[in-house]
Image (cartoon, helix red, strand yellow):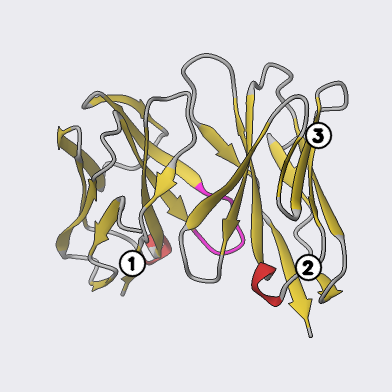
Amino acid sequence: ETGVTQTPRHLVMGMTNKKSLKCEQHLGHNAMYWYKQSAKKPLELMFVYNFKEQTENNSVPSRFSPECPNSSHLFLHLHTLQPEDSALYLCASSQDMQNEAFFGQGTRLTVV
Amino acid sequence: RKEVEQDPGPFNVPEGATVAFNCTYSNSASQSFFWYRQDCRKEPKLLMSVYSSGNEDGRFTAQLNRASQYISLLIRDSKLSDSATYLCVVMNSGYSTLTFGKGTMLLVSP
């Protein structure tokens, strides 16, 4: 299933690096999301875009910066991250904000 | 009280067994409910939606109890391939996003 595609699948970065995560959905959905999944914790919603407009930012530190250039692409720009930011970052999309979400395979990020 | 609570498990069952998970939610205005399945180091995948009247999909049955604010998932005739973490997911009213529980781990052994 390649409805929601994320790249890269794995990323190791130093605390001074700048990198970007990419997400693309081929489902014609209008809403896209970034989630963070850390060990022993439930999925944490980070950002929501609905029709390319950011509708939610769940108190995410400014070292994470989302970008949604169109309804099928979503980026997460990373800079000066901390080791505790190491986690699985999942992108998801849904038809609208009242429907179930479909996830990409995630980017496993390690900050060293 | 956490928004969505699940017993983390693990639930260890033999093949062929029937197993049930419960999940409680705190927001009485919640309107949509789902069960997702997540395999180790993979992304969550939608297993089934949960309807007010209850619904069944093969060996899987989901129930909703609004009065007690819990949903359940019953798996009959467990298979080895059912081993995974099952995530309870709740959506509140209006334009709202999904709230996930921590998940319940199921291990099915031969």
Mark 2 vs mark 1: in front: 2
Please name the amino acid that badge 2 sits on: Ser
Q: Is residue A40 magenta?
A: yes
Which segment did they paint magenta? A38-43
Q: Secondary structure at mark 1?
A: strand
Residue B102 can be seen in this image: no
Q: Secondary structure at mark 2?
A: loop
Residue B66: x %, y % from top left: 81, 23
User: CA–CA distance between discs 2 and 3?
Assistant: 23 Å
Q: Residue at x 78, y 26 (%)?
A: B53
Q: Which residue is mark 1?
A: A109
Pointer 1 local density, CA inside 10 Å: few below 14, some 14–19, many at least 20: some
Residue B78, numbered circle: 2
Decide: is A66 above or below A13: above
Q: Secondary structure at mark 3?
A: strand
Pointer 3 local density, CA inside 10 Å: few below 14, some 14–19, many at least 20: some
**Which quarter of the figure has residue A17?**
bottom left
Magenta stretch: dominant SS? loop
